[in-house]
Amino acid sequence: MGRKRVLILILPLFAVAALSLFFYKVSVESRKFSMQVDHAIDVMNALRGTRSYMEEADSAKDQFLKTGNEEYRAEYDAALNLMWRNFNYAGLLIVDPLQQNRINSLRRVINSIINESKKEIAQSLVSIDSNNQLMKIFHAQIIQILEIQTTELKQRNMAEQASFRRIDQMSTSGIFLLLLFCSMTSFLIYQLMRHIDDLEKAHREEKERRDKIQGLLRILDESPDFIGTSDFEGNLKYHNVAAKKMLGLPLDSNMEGLKIADMHPAWAAKFVLEKGIPEVLAHGSWQAETALLHRLGHEFPVSQVLFMVKDEQGKPAYLATIMRDISALKRIQNDLLDAMKVKSEFTSMVSHELRTPLTVIKESVAIVYDETAGPVNPDQKDFLETAKRNVDRLGRLINDVLDYQKLESHHMEMRMVQQSINDVIQEVRNSFEIVLAKRSISLEMRLQTDLPNINFDKDKIIQVLVNLVNNAVKFTDRGSIILTSQMIDGKAIKVSVKDSGIGIMKEDLDKLFKSFSQISTGTGRQTGGTGLGLALCKKIIEHHHGTVGVDSVYGQGSTFYFILPIEEKGMD
Amino acid sequence: MKKILIADDEPDILKVVKFRLIKAGYEIMMAVNGKEAIELVQKIKPDLVLLDFSMPLMNGDEVCKQIKADPLTKHIPVIMMTASTERAHETHIKMIGADDRLLKPFEPEDLIEKVEKFVR
């Protein structure tokens, strides 16, 4: 490509070089002519000099002869001498052989003139006649030579002018032709190269386009998803390799003649044609779980996307679809649903099958214990009480485990109602009155009276509060338990249960809200706890989008609290 | 003497509840499935019915609904007994038209208290 561009540049350079050479030639030629002209002028000047010095010598001689003045004599000698020099010079310059002969014959004349004059003048004898004769011959000869030279010079001048004119014409037309040739050639070459460039570009673009299409086709064929198109009448057009594999068709098969309805089981075909295609026509795309029908007759679930492809003018051109085999996903989903069903069945089984015998045990023990079935002695009564207490504990454990499981799997139904938290605290406090009457603990309330109603499940919050108060009662021997409610920044309500009990060691604080992590009280105290109480509280409060926490100083007491948001954040 | 019908498919439950209520001075009749229960209610018209939720042939929900749908029996108070916290929930109890509930395992005092509430 670059080389061709250089050619375009070289051509004018070549033209410039040719022009330079041409002008050089012209200048050499013209210099040669002018040298010849200069030479002819020199010859003329020398001859004219010869003539004028001769006339000068003649007049000096006349003066000398008249006056006898020696000055004229010297003048005559000098003029004669200069005449002779000029003549010699002319003789040297003249190259024409004929003129040369004339000059040579004249040279003899001039020599005798000079010799005789010297002699005559030296003797002061005047023999003017012979001298005059010789002078006349010389004069005539010089004039003849001059005339010839003049004619020659004229001829030369004319020739020179003619030659200059010729050169002029030649160079004008030469330059014009050369320029014409160069520009024509450049233009042609330029056009040619542009054409070549266009061809190359078109070729390259075509190749790129082909590569791109090939690449796209490879992507389509390597895709494990079904990719295909059809017209709006449902006639299948393009289909990738995966499509043929999924339908169980041979890879070299042509899918022409097949319709959308042929590749789906009946129900899915109906779904796609009656629901999918209208949806695509209305909104551009549709997706759903449908199914494909393998050639051997079995169907399998797919996740299908159906969409419209538009042409360059933006008009709907055809339908395209992508389908992914979701058999594995479906299997997992079904397994999961089965597992969830089993779990829920198990839960209800446990709740029924464990609670029923527990009811019987509890009633039986109670009937004997309260002597409805006859008197028992104090030792027997003591053991019956132990049995009773542990049956109760077992009952609580069952309840807690079930509750915890439900909260964990988000199966716990929350009955959220806008209501007063203070009413609930009051209710819980009242339920503890009888228990606490027997003990030296006071249960006080410090409630903020202007609290707004908030959204919560009353039964669940009571469960939490009872749990917290129960814990406080369990670990407090004397002093007070204080229930407080207060607003925090107008955004939440904090409810706390403060006791003056044994407190909790710092290292145990983190374990408190974890399931089955009863901490050692170090007192051998019979707590009857299930190890799930606080974990349950935490779960319940978290289902209310709240938080639970504890502050405690070992030996001085603990404060358990929960914070419920005032703004409703949706139900569970 | 007030008549109380207890319906439960668990003989041991029947046994302990019957014992306690007889001691408390009531006349007791028993049914071991829902069908028997509804027949006894229609025939004897007891003063109170204690119904277990899950029973063969007809479950407690259905028995309760039938008692409450029949103008001749709908005045009879029904207390549902269940081990399921869901079914013992107030909304469910209201839905089937029952008067009260006893969540298994119940306290002996609760049983007497609830019975006395309706049969006085």
Image (tube, rainbow, N blue to C red):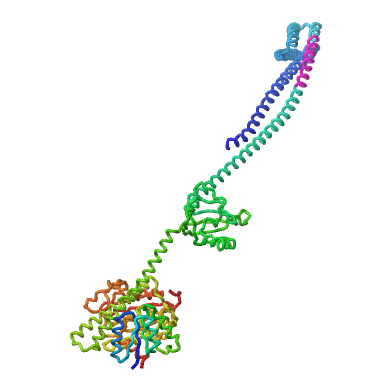
The image quadrant of residue B94 is bottom left
On the image, the x and y values in percent for residue A129 come to 81, 6
Residue A223 in the image: above or below residue A22: below
In-front residue for pair A58/A533: A533
Residue A126 in the image: above or below residue B106: above
In-front residue for pair A15/A439: A439
Can residue A316 be seen?
A: yes
Question: For residue A143: magenta?
Answer: yes
Q: Quadrant of the N terminus of chain A?
A: top right
On the image, the x and y values in percent for residue A106 come to 75, 9
**Image position of A152 (left or right of A242):** right
Question: For residue A358: magenta?
Answer: no
**Image position of A54 (left or right of A473):** right
The image quadrant of residue A181 is top right
**Image position of A206 (left or right of B5):** right
The residue sitting at 35% across, 90% down in the picture is: B3
The image quadrant of residue A386 is bottom left
The residue sitting at 46% across, 58% down in the picture is: A300
In-front residue for pair A461/A252: A252
Q: Which stretch is magenta?
A: A136-159
On the image, the x and y values in percent for residue A48 come to 76, 17
Can residue A535 be seen?
A: no
Residue A412 in the image: above or below residue B66: above
On the image, the x and y values in percent for residue A237 come to 56, 52
Residue B27 in the image: above or below residue A507: below
Prevalent SS, magenta region: helix
